[in-house]
Amino acid sequence: FNSMLDALQNSQEEIARLQEEKINRVDKMVLVGQIAAGIAHQMKTPLASAMLRAEMLMEDGKNKSYLEELNFINHQLQRCKEIVEHLLNFSRSTKTKEKLQEQNFNKVLTDIIEILIHIFKRNDISLKTDITETDKVKVLATRDQLEQVFLNLFSNSFDAIGKDGTISIKTKIVGSNFIEIDFTDDGSGISKENLNKIFEPFFTTKEAKNGTGLGLAICRKLIEELNGTITVASEVNKYT
């Protein structure tokens, strides 16, 4: 009997610890989101002005080396613009209060695939889907939440594969209230020491010019808002 009480107490303590850990993580995400929003809004106007000036100069420029320098400047400004958009998406994901509505899960997923089809073709990436089980399933969410999750997962897979690989998506119904989405790519994989870090804001294994470290943090935040969970399994140079 005493051992049962001890086990129960240990279980309650573990639950309390996990709840506190989740609360702390949510608080941290909200704070980071507020900071990100402030930075992004301050950067939007000067970036837009600089890009406009660069484009105007490119239209007037005749010297080849001069145009090459302007192209470089414009490319870097475009990259900054992408980072700002990632920051704004991240800040919005920490305070999503839109009214949840029933969404046809497969329809949202296939719409995103259609948008990205040119990337699949350009990089010789194959797509395999087994989603018939959730063909008529509706989930309570905003369309933006689902789209952001799918876009970020696809983006990570594209980066991991580069060219000539496969992305596989399989869905199934779990119980009466959940669906499971298995999203797999055969790209570069994730090392063991980084597996527990990839959902942290601003953590990235990509070069500074290629990643902000916000995509998977956004995924986790949005999925948890929908009472779901996200987990990862990976082997380097095999799959994620």
Image: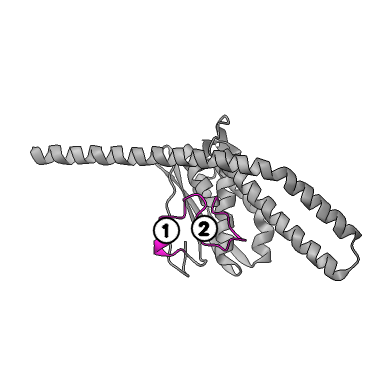
To which quarter of the image does residue 164 belong? bottom right
Label 1 element class: helix
Q: Main secondary structure of the magenta part?
A: loop
Label 2 element class: loop
To which quarter of the image does residue 40 belong? top right
Q: Amino acid at mark 1?
A: Leu
Rendered view: 191 above or below 51: below
Rendered view: 239 above or below 8: below
Which of disc 2 and disc 1 is earlier in sequence? 1
Residue under pointer 1: 195
Residue under pointer 2: 204
In the rendered image, the quadrant that contains the N terminus is top left
Residue 161 location in percent, x, y? 56, 66
Instruction: Identify the residue at horizontal 91%, vertical 66% (top origin).
Output: 62
User: Quick check: marks 1 and 2 in contact, CB under 8 Å?
Assistant: no
Position of residue 169 in the picture relative to residue 176 (left or right):
right
Rendered view: 60 above or below 10: below
Residue 73 location in percent, x, y? 75, 60
Q: Amino acid at mark 2?
A: Thr
Q: Is residue 196 magenta?
A: yes
Instruction: Identify the residue at horizontal 65%, vertical 66% (top origin).
Output: 123
* Residue count near mark 2 (Cα–Cα under 10 Å), binned few <14, some 14–19, many ≥20: some
